[in-house]
Amino acid sequence: MPATESLMIYAEGVQKRFTQRPIFKPVSFEASAGDIIAITGFNGAGKSTLLKIIGNVLSPSKGSCSWKMAGKTLDHDGIRTRLGYVAPYLELYDELTAVEHVQLVAQLKGIPIAEQAAAGLLNDFGLDPKIAKSDRHLRAYSSGMKQRVRCAMAFACTPSALLLDEPTSNLDEAGTSIVLVQAHNAAARGAIVFIATNDPRERAIAQREIVIEPV
């Protein structure tokens, strides 16, 4: 789905409990097209958990989080097709190529992408075109190369919202710059961008921050 759709994301008093104990104070926010929002807090504060709640992967224990377009609340499928997600712990398939990973994400969204276009997207994230177009499986990739693939997967099909969990992990300076420029460009096209991070380089592109506070 194009990022130019008029998407709004709302959170009201969101909390998550593990073993009956809330892990952070209630979080409320409103996000609209073009916003870049950093989610910050100490390690283990719940940044990744909040991202998953925003992406409808986890349900909040308290409060609510909703996606709305033209005044209508999107259901799970409506969110899934408009969402791009990356995290350093996101599992990849060792037996697939980089192009096949991008094509798989597009297929799951119901938006097929040609091999050449998938290779071009990988190249946009700094993966050597010869490698991207080859039949080399992910098992032979370095950690940095795998992170470039994860980022390309997140940005495939021009998502309306991007949830970026420490997106520049394992990347060199050139790779970091590419990801931050791509995130900025996505927001300029109208996407909502959330970045869970404590990295000052990632925080620097955000317009505002949500600080996760312990209970």
Image: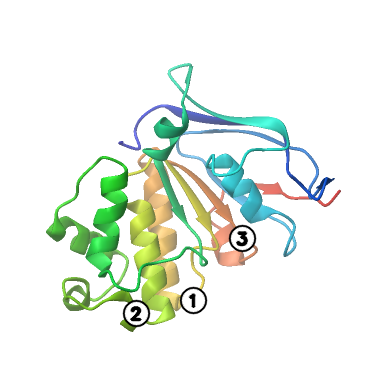
Which x, y percent locates residue 34? 45, 39
Q: Which residue is at a point 22% across and 78% down the rendered structure image?
A: 136
Labelled pair 2, 3 in contact (Cβ < 8 Å): no
Q: Mark 2 sits on what residue?
A: 139
User: Looking at the image, can residue 123 be seen?
Assistant: no
Q: Secondary structure at mark 3?
A: loop
**In the figure, residue 5 lies in which quadrant?**
top left
Q: Using the image, tell me which numbered label, if any, was put on residue 170.
A: 1
Nearer to me, 20 or 207: 20
Which x, y percent locates residue 146? 38, 73
Q: Mark 3 sits on what residue?
A: 197
Left or right placement of residue 154 versus residue 129 in this view: right
Q: Earlier in the sequence, mark 1 or mark 2?
A: 2
Nearer to me, 59 or 155: 59
Amino acid at pointer 1: Asn
What distance separates the C-alpha of mark 3 from that of mark 1? 14 Å
Q: Earlier in the sequence, mark 3 or mark 1?
A: 1
Amino acid at pointer 2: Arg
Left or right placement of residue 134 versus residue 188 in this view: left
Which x, y percent locates residue 50? 64, 47
What distance separates the C-alpha of mark 2 from that of mark 3? 27 Å
What distance separates the C-alpha of mark 1 from that of mark 2? 16 Å
Q: Residues within 10 Å of mark 2 (few under 14, many from 20)?
A: few
Q: Residues within 10 Å of mark 1 (few under 14, many from 20)?
A: some
